[in-house]
Image: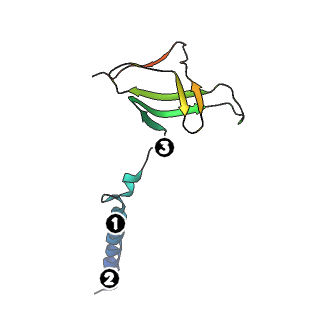
Amino acid sequence: MSSSLRRGALAAAAIAFSIASLSACAAGHNAQTLQIQPDNAATTVGDIKIQNAIVVTQPDLESTGPAVVSATLFNQGDTDQTLESVTLPGTGKTAELSPAEGGSLTVPAAAR
């Protein structure tokens, strides 16, 4: 066997081995791609589903002033829901909610 043919066969074997080992990480029930989690806040409380929740506060860490809450809310129930406050578990602290236009913060029922 000539040396160029051996080098070609060795290169082909190396490429085949690297392709097989790289494709293995995306296969099976415990694939690494299945472990990807979104990096946004999301939870469900009763019929209300909350996604992309962000709280913007004053730059001072000791501030007790107003904050802005931005979130996407979904009502999966059959009746409209009015949100009045948010309580942080374990802290005993409650934040009163009011929409930018004033009035009440009502999340309409899911259209079925």
Q: Earlier in the sequence, mark 3 or mark 1?
A: 1
Q: Amino acid at mark 1?
A: Ile
* Quadrant in which residue 11 is drawn: bottom left
Q: Residue at x 52, y 12 (%)?
A: 103
- The answer to whether mark 1 and mark 2 are in CB contact below 8 A is no
Q: Amino acid at mark 3?
A: Asp
Q: Residue 81 appears at what percent x and percent y? A: 42, 20
Q: Earlier in the sequence, mark 1 or mark 2?
A: 2
* Quadrant in which residue 3 is drawn: bottom left
Question: Is residue 80 found left or right of 102 in the rendered image?
Answer: left
- The colour scheme applied to this rendered structure is rainbow
Assess disc 1: are there few (<14), some (14-19) or many (≥20) residues with their C-alpha within 10 Å of its C-alpha. Answer: few
Q: Residue at x 55, y 17 (%)?
A: 100
Q: Residue 49 appears at what percent x and percent y? A: 41, 31
Q: Which residue is mark 3?
A: 39
| Badge 3 element | loop
Quarter containing the C terminus: top left
Residue sitting nearer the eye, 91 or 37: 91
When the figure is inspected, residue 53 is found, relative to residue 107, above or below; the finding is below
When the figure is inspected, residue 98 is found, relative to residue 11, above or below; the finding is above
Assess disc 2: are there few (<14), some (14-19) or many (≥20) residues with their C-alpha within 10 Å of its C-alpha. Answer: few
Q: Earlier in the sequence, mark 3 or mark 2?
A: 2
Quarter containing the N terminus: bottom left
- The answer to whether mark 3 and mark 1 are in CB contact below 8 A is no
Q: Which residue is mark 2?
A: 6
Residue sitting nearer the eye, 24 or 35: 35
Nearer mark to the viewer, of 3 and 1: 3
Checking the image for residue 19, the label placed there is: 1
Q: Amino acid at mark 2?
A: Arg
Assess disc 3: are there few (<14), some (14-19) or many (≥20) residues with their C-alpha within 10 Å of its C-alpha. Answer: few
Q: Residue 48 appears at what percent x and percent y? A: 41, 29
What is the spatial separation of the Cα atoms under label 3 and label 1, in whole angstroms?
Answer: 30 Å
